[in-house]
Image (tube, rainbow, N blue to C red):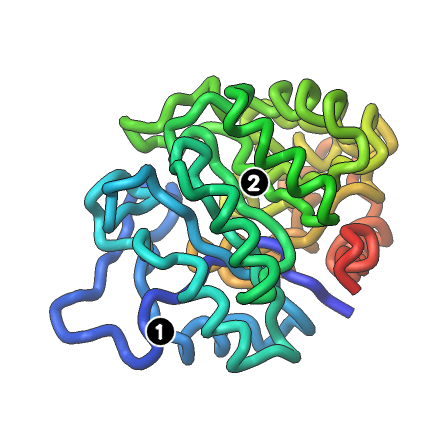
Amino acid sequence: MIIDVHTHTPQYRHAVPEGRRHINTAWRPDTARPANYSWAEYRESQSVVDKSIVFGIAWEPGERVGSSAGPGDDGDVADTVNDFTATFVRAYPEELIGFMSVHPYDLRAMDEMDRSRVDLGLRGVKLGANYQSYDPLDRRALAIYQYAERHGLPILFHTGTSAVKSAPIPAAHPLIVDEIAMRYPELKIIMAHMGHPWTVDAVVVVRKHANVYTDISGMIFRPYTSYEALIKATEWNVLDKLLFGSDFPIATPAETMARLRGVNDILEGTRMPRVPEDKIEEIIHRDSLALLGLE
């Protein structure tokens, strides 16, 4: 079984309208990628996996259109983001598991979590304190973590840097998850992107906390970063806590698998340590849903 734990909800049920396609040139150093896409484009990319976790991002109240490329960008749905995700998941329940997103500073956040869990059937939470511009240890954010722990909703946090000028980098440092996990030890947490470039910090956090995992999404197009991160995980004996994720549309699952399997290619002609190939296959085929209580 192959589970992609990190994908973003398509903005369009049908083809992207003429003139509305947005191409992002900042996400990756090697290629540009479409920031908006259709249900069909998403499903084609995910056809190589068995199940995908999909989510949007809730922007600050009043921001009807936002994006991980910056406020006002036509990259993500801001208004009724959870309805968009739920509609998509209900259309393909055998393929998808939906996560909700809320903004801690929204006065309706807790009501929206109830609605998304009970009425929409969404089964986890996606948060990014840097993109959403909130203090991850603010009491309003802590209330969201407490709710998620009580109701068995895993939280996927964006961790790591960002090129978005409005996204405060310290808000997404992986060591913040250490503080959250100490306060909510039963909360299942996924740290996205292995906290790159602070991958060793992400590694020691997942080593410390039984219910904290990290995904490998968004790293594979930086060969040395990927190798270094996986070697750190090898040396700290936490390869079993790494989850497969593509970060679609930034990368596809097929591309992620191929580059993950080739992570040792840069070592040719050296005596540098290699990431065990059998462990790489275990990452790709890991039953992340069982680990997260989402079976």
Q: CA distance from mark 1 to mark 2?
A: 29 Å
Q: Earlier in the sequence, mark 1 or mark 2?
A: 1
Q: Can I make out residue 10 in this image?
A: yes
Under mark 1, the amino acid is Ser
The foreground one among 56 and 36 is: 56
Can see residue 271? no
Image quarter of residue 62 = top left
Residue 86, above or below 294: below
Asked if 216 appears above or below 39 in the picture, the reply is above
Within 10 angstroms of label 2, few (less than 14), some, or many (20 or more) residues? some
Check whether the beta carbons of the residues at disc 1 and disc 2 lie within 8 A of each other. Answer: no
Kindly identify the residue that appears in the image at 64 percent across and 27 percent down.
199
Q: Position of residue 100 (x, y in %)?
A: 52, 53
The picture places residue 31, in percent across and down from the top left corner, at 35, 52
Q: Which residue type carries mark 2?
A: Pro
What residue did someone put label 2 on?
223
Q: Residue furthest left?
A: 19
Find disc 1 in the rendering and name its residue.
38
- Which class describes the residues within 10 Å of circle 1: few (<14), some (14-19), or many (20+)? some
